Image (cartoon, grey):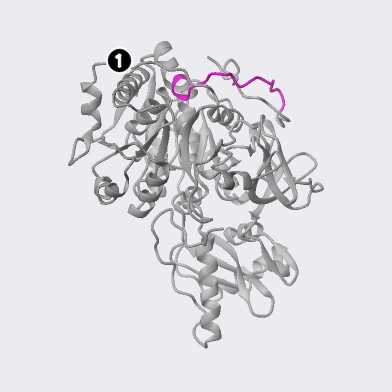
Amino acid sequence: MSARDRRHDYQIKNGCFPGESPVRVPEFFNIAEACLMSHARAFPQAVALMDLSRDAQIWTYADMARAAERLAAVWQDQGLQPGDRVAILLPQCAEALIAHFAAHLIGAVSLPLFVLFGPDALRFRLKDSGAKILVSDQAQYPKICEIQPELPDLDKVYLRDGASGLADGLWGAIEAQDAPYRPIQTRAEDPAMMIYTSGTTGNPKGVLHAHRFLLGHLPCLELSFADFPNGADIGWTPADWAWIGGLMDMAIPCFYFRVPLVAKRFERFTAGAAFDLIRDAQITRAFLPPTALKMMRQAERQATAQLRSISSGGEPLSAELIDWAKEALGAEVNELYGQTECNLSAGSARSLGVAQSGWIGQAFPGFDMRILDERGQAVPDGQIGQICVHRDTPTMFLRYWNQPQKTAERFVGDYLMTGDLGRMDAQGYVQFMARDDDVITSSGYRIGPAEIEAVLARAPQVVMAAVVAAPDATRGHVIGAYVTVNGPPEPEFEADLIAQVSRQLSPHMAPKWVRVLEEMPMTATGKIRRLDLREMAAQALETEQKGGSLRPAQPQPRAHGQSQRPKR
């Protein structure tokens, strides 16, 4: 079935791309039915998943559907009810998706968790969500044992690689199940998945999504991946499936479109391993976060020509990085914009001519995106305001888990305030400027870091760059920059970077200082933890005022997903 024949049940409002027709969100919709069960009936022997997480194993739709139905029956017999939460603490593997689909089949809510989370991060999410079932593996089980006494709602733990202690073996339970799965019907607005925010602004919040949020992801895939699906595609992302980018920008939509998916996430990402996998698994479509692209660029290798298109998002992409990918990887890169609360709401589609250097792209069909001020009033074209998305859009979240006040605070009228500053031109192109709390006010200027970071990242030796507001006794704040580099820098390296920004942007946008870090502090989802950098800058100023060295200590490691920012 062609992509056009599989046009989706989402309500299109103000679509920016030509040739799209409005359709409706159906009353009833289920992610597992649309992505797995329907294909298992029509194409039972078609390849659904190539699981390279351990020994290579090919899974057909019939294989996956049989396991998901049996697991759903196991949980029904145990009394799991629609709306109950099922936590999934697994790397990319078949069992992770089987658990998601099994939960969706019975109306439960799947809850992906990152395997690098420490006990504190897991404790918070499992306790806050009230998860009743956890699917994991032997490698994670010691952390689970440590925190399980503090999780009164957690009734059962399953391990994909066999029973251990009080945990049951996942496959033993699946194979022993005799009673059939009892089908239920879910509405499109019923809860289906909960993904926690990365914790950069206080405690992580559980973002609850409905089944219909899958439908909102589909126009992005069709439009950013040219000629997709074409019957010969294979999809892959190095992003963890616990992150909405890995799970919903690639993994689940591949199942919907009946595109074989490769499951392989490296314990430590290396450019060489990524190039080899793209070649050996014959990947044609990839979601590659900016950090992965930057590391691949540093490797100075070329992939084979079968890679047809790349999507990327999470941090702004420089024009130079996009040009490099086209030359070295043989594929266009389309930038995506979204949040855990409302994903894939804007982007570029170069094959359709929807791309503009330095701009993310336009709102996808079904997304009413505007630039508003803090009162919810539209700002003139080209002026900076907050990027906002109408609440009646396909991927909009239902609510924050158990936080109605936090949910209400995110909206002004009918628009979600994303917390991202940007601007929109008369054609509807959107440019990301900064997080609203990353804006630097210095000597009366309001300055976003994105443009400065783009200039710094163009320097051949710079791997990653981050710009923050650094406290200053005279001007309130000045621009400070942190970079990681490839190889030891020359003595004038930092001064040269400052001069480059002054030349290419403006003297008032040039950093007062640039400091080289051995490692950039990152969130669990691969974003730069700017709060850590601001704290380092404050500590450096304090040290300087006391007559010590200006250079701060290297960032200290923290438990993944945790933040020291005070609650708002």
Q: Which residue is mark 1?
A: 180
Pinpoint residue 182: horizontal percent, then vertical percent.
36, 16
Asked whether residue 83 appears in the rendered view, the answer is: yes
Locate the C terminus and report the quarter of the image it occupies: bottom right
Q: Main secondary structure of the magenta part?
A: loop
Q: Amino acid at mark 1?
A: Pro
Residue 412: name its quadrant: top right
Pinpoint residue 54: horizontal percent, then vertical percent.
27, 37
**In this view of the protein, which residue sits in the foreground, 503 or 403?**
403
Who's the residue at 65% across and 67% down the image? 500
Residue 165: name its quadrant: top left
Q: Is residue 539 above or below residue 520?
A: below
Pinpoint residue 405: horizontal percent, then vertical percent.
58, 47
Tell whether 555 sits left or right of 445.
Answer: left
User: Would you call the spot at circle 1 few (<14 residues within 10 Å), some (14-19), or many (20 or more)?
Assistant: some
Who's the residue at 50% across and 77% down the image? 551
* Range of residues picked out in magenta: 18-33
**In magenta stretch: residue 25:** yes
Who's the residue at 40% across and 12% down the image? 41
**In this view of the protein, which residue sits in the foreground, 96 or 287?**
96
